[in-house]
Image: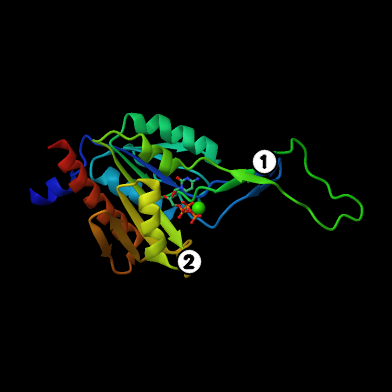
Amino acid sequence: EQHLRSQQSLRGEKIVVTAGGTLEPIDPVRFIGNRSSGKMGIAIAQAAAEAGADVTLIYGHVTCDLPDNRKIKLIHASQAEQMASSVKEAFRKSNCLIMAAAVADWQSAKVADHKLKKQLGQTELNLKLVRTPDILATTAADKRSDQLVIGFAAETNDLLKNAQVKLQKKGADYIIANDVSKDVFGSDQDQVTVISRQGQDRWPRLSKSEIAQKIIALVARELEKRHD
Ligand code: CTP
Ligand code: CA
């Protein structure tokens, strides 16, 4: 009975999860991308669905299989701007957002409608990039008090200091900090530290599916408090 109940800790909840990397086009055949595999976000979506939640998984470029689960609605968003509008729409009707996607910070100022050609003797190309919308920050800024917003922080140095700054700047309830300088992209494991206004909690190196289950347990506890 205990087992059944704990499995259904998110029954009736609506959770939005993002996964994978966005690809920002330069011209019809080229883009700027990143090394995200989508594994962490997909594991979180699976864990949420197994806990009984209705999940909307908004995914960019992923290098692993997408989940096949009737509790998970799949929405593709290849660029940051599309992901921003999909998240905005889905989050309105939801209790929680978990931003595991690696959203590009920059997009091409101008996307060419034809393939860019090299000119004779050309040795340099300058690309002008402009900022993408910060999905986590804008969502956290207008969330309702019953809604929970969780972000990630990918850092290669000064992990906890940078992640603490992100918690403040983004206005998220939690930041899951991970060190991406070694062996994270595409890996099945990760070592994270969970940061909130209450403090920091360092988790051991675990499989991404174990991390996902622990994040979902945290979400269940937080949403429980909000429903009181
Ligand atoms: N994020 C977002 N929209 C963006 C960029 C990032 O929603 N345009 C989210 C990511 O999904 C993640 C969190 O913000 O949950 C932190 O992403 P990260 O790349 O670690 O931090 P940035 O704020 O982009 O700062 P920087 O890359 O300069 O360290
Ligand atoms: Ca970034």
Q: Is residue 71 above or below residue 217?
A: above
Q: In this view, does 7 lie above or below 164?
A: above
Using the rendered view, name the quadrant where residue 137 is placed.
top left
Using the rendered view, name the quadrant where residue 122 is placed.
bottom right
Considering the numbered disc 2 on the image, is that residue within a helix, a strand or a loop? loop
> How many numbered discs sit on the rendered protein?
2
Please state the horizontal and vertical placement of residue 118, each as a whole percent of the image.
84, 50
Q: Name, please, the residue furthest toward the right.
A: 120
- In primary-sequence order, the first of circles 1 and 2 is 1
Q: Which colour scheme is used?
A: rainbow
Residue depicted at x 77% and y 37% = 114
Please state the horizontal and vertical placement of residue 53, each as a whole percent of the image.
26, 39
Q: Does residue 30 appear in this view? A: yes
Q: What residue type is labelled 1?
A: Ala
Cβ of mark 2 under 8 Å from ligand 1: the answer is no
Considering the numbered disc 1 on the image, is that residue within a helix, a strand or a loop? loop
Q: Residue 156 carries which label?
A: 2
Q: Does residue 24 appear in this view? A: no
Q: Name, please, the residue furthest toward the left.
A: 1
Q: What residue type is labelled 2?
A: Thr
- Viewer-closest of 135 and 69: 135
Q: Is 51 displayed left or right of 133 in the figure?
A: left
Please state the horizontal and vertical placement of residue 76, each as a whole percent of the image.
49, 38
**Residue position marked by numbered label 1 in the rendering:** 109
Q: In this view, does 199 lie above or below 80?
A: below
Q: Judge the density around disc 2: few (<14), some (14-19), many (≥20) Cα neighbours within 10 Å.
A: few
